[in-house]
Structures are given as C-alpha cells and as structure tokens.
Amino acid sequence: MRRFPGNDRCADCNKVFPQWASVTFGILLCLDCAGKHRALGVQTSFVKSLSMDTWTPKDLLSLEYGGNGKWNAVCMASGLHKLTTSYKYASTTADAYRARMQDAVLCETPFTLVDILTELNLPLDVPQSSPVRRHASMIELPPPASPVKVHLHKQPSLEVKCTLCHAFLTLSELDSHSTQCASTALPTETYEEIEFDTALGKPHGNSTSPSPLGLSLSRSSDGDTMVSRITPGGDADLAGVLVGSRVLAINGLQTPKFDALMKYLSGPASRVRPISFTFSVRRQVHVLEIELTEEMVGCHFVTSIYGHCVVKSVDTGGHAATQGLQPGMRVVEVNDGQTSTSDNDSRGLMAALTSRRRPLRLRVHKYLDAKQTQAFMRLWS
C-alpha cells in the first residue's frame, strides 16, 4: 500500500514511512497524526495500525480505492490543505469524500480522482504540489469566448509524483522507481509503537501465593497511566514492560486514565491475581536498508518476546558487520516484499531470512535508546 501515489509519506504532515491508516478515508498516517484522527472520533475517522491491528477485506479495499495521492489532490483543489486537522475533516468536502469512500467499499466499485473532483465540482487541474497530476493533453477546453467547460474524451492517464525525489512517473514505473529511490532517501527517524497483553502477579514455582506485580504506576502530564518504575527480575520486567510504557487496560477495563485505573485497583477486584494488563511501548528508531549478498552472512536472528524478528548477534569482521547490521536491530521487511504483518508473527520474515536467496535486502529499525535495546536483548527467546 505504501507504493500507491503519495503513500510513502503521511497524508497530513508529510512525515516519511507512515505506519498507521485512516480506514475511513483510505489514507496512511504517521503516529502523531493517527493520534489526532483518534481524537476526532471513530464516526469521523477510524484509525488502525498497519502492523498491530487485524484487517478485514473491506478495510483493505478502503486503502486500495483511496490513497494519499487521491485525498491530497482533493484537499489541494478545495483548499483543505490550509486547514488544521479538526477543521479539515469536519468540512463538507471531507463528509462527501467519506460518503463516496463508504459507497465504493460497500459496492466494491473503485472511483478515480477525476470522478470525485467532478462530483465535488472542483477544478480538474490539480496543482503541481499535489502527489497526482493529469496530462493536460487529455483535456479539451472550448474557446475562451464561450462558457468554460471541461470535456473528457476518456479517463485521463495519471502521473504519480514520488514524494522522495519529486520525479513524475506513470503508475507502471512506480514500483521499480520506488525500489531505487528508497535506498537514497530513507526516513531518518520515526517511531515504533507496540501494544501487548500480559498477566502479572502469577504464583511462581510451587508457591500458591501471588507474586508482586514488579512495577509502579504514575500519572502522565495528560492524565494517562505510565510505568514509572520496574523491579529488576520481577514479573513486569520479565514480561517486557519498560519504564515509560503506557497502560491501556487492566482486566478488560479499557481506559488509559490514571484516576479510573487507580479507583479500580483500589477495589476488591485487584486482590484477585493474576491481573491482566494491556501495555503500549513507544520507541524512537532510525529506519535503514541493508543488503547482504554473501552466502554466509555472519549473524544470528531470533524472535523477541514481542514476536519480532531481531538481530541477536553479529560476527566480528563478518559480512553482516561490514554491511552495518548490529545487534538489537529489528528486521521489518525482506526483499521488498516479505513484511512483518503482525507484531506476534515473525515466521514469514524468518523463512525469508533463512532461505538461500541472495541478495537479502533488509529494512531494519535501529533503536536510539541504548538502555531500551539492552532491556530487549535480555528478553529474546
């Protein structure tokens, strides 16, 4: 989906490597803009993670029929690109686009950019700063003396603007160009967010008494619940909970708010162990691409406690070391195709990595927090 026009960057802020999506509008978003969309409410924009959430065929149709390029072209033509997120998605144009997307998915009938621009009575000459433009040769304008109308002989061909190098390409050229262009213009920094469930306070060994949870909770500046302390070797530590993790739910109570969770934990339900938690861990990463060409790559891949495919060790002086691969890196894509589709399933990546196919083109996340990397290395299976 990132190969679709404009999908290599966030639809709202242009940040590279978007990892979230608005199913409602069929667009890809960065983590920060996904949070803004969630604040609008699911009735306005329903947000999902590309890697952490389950996608239905209807959800995928939304991304297939939409795309950042199409939505951004509508925003440019209508002037919505000048508005803040809340005003943009509360506009009548956004309402009409949302309804058109719903109809298209329901009837499984795609629509073109020209279709939606015509329905919204917007100009068909999309500004050049949009990710999509039309060939002017496909439009016939009558003489200036008569009322200006646009006559389309056939569905116009589209050129796609690479938002990395700004070159215009036909759709058939986009895949091969993106592979070459991405190697010279990868996103430098982004964030990775992991959601996971775990049970804390289980009895250990032959003991029937519940063990301590092994963490301390505190209120964040926005009123949410944060992990402020971890007991080394405790339940939370062994489960992969880190200082700074957010609590999203306790025993099915779905709220991150500190006051609500503390009220619940002070009641009788908290005395029943173990206690189920849902945590969210956010980590800053560099996104890199590394190519391995030799048969013996000289490194070891394992599955982490979160189900990620990670580099456990690299042989000194080996091929992987000379190519820049380091312990602690997470592999998120192999050979531009096999991608980590779920935070709990790295089997596809492992199969691609252990094959004899060469070269191996890896997209990896390098974590910027050394303490977090050390903590994760202790937890790898």
Image (cartoon, rainbow, N blue to C red):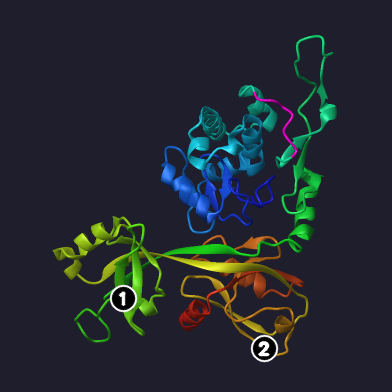
Quarter of the image for residue 153 reads top right
Q: Secondary structure at mark 1?
A: strand
Furthest-left residue in this view = 268
Quarter of the image for residue 155 reads top right
Would residue 235 be found to the left or right of residue 157 on screen? left
Percent coordinates x, y for residue 65 in the rendering: 62, 38
Q: Which residue is mark 1?
A: 215
Amino acid carrying label 1: it is Leu
Question: Which disc number belongs to residue 284?
Answer: none
Q: Secondary structure at mark 2?
A: loop
Quarter of the image for residue 105 reads top right
**Count of picture labels:** 2
The crowd level at tag 2 (other Cα within 10 Å; few <14, some 14-19, many 20+) is some
> From which residue to which does the magenta span run?
122-128
Furthest-top residue in this view = 146
Percent coordinates x, y for residue 296 in the rendering: 73, 83
Question: Which disc number belongs to residue 315?
Answer: 2
Percent coordinates x, y for residue 253 in the rendering: 27, 57
Say which of 93 and 364 sits in front: 93
Say which of 338 and 269 sits in front: 269
Amino acid carrying label 2: it is Asp
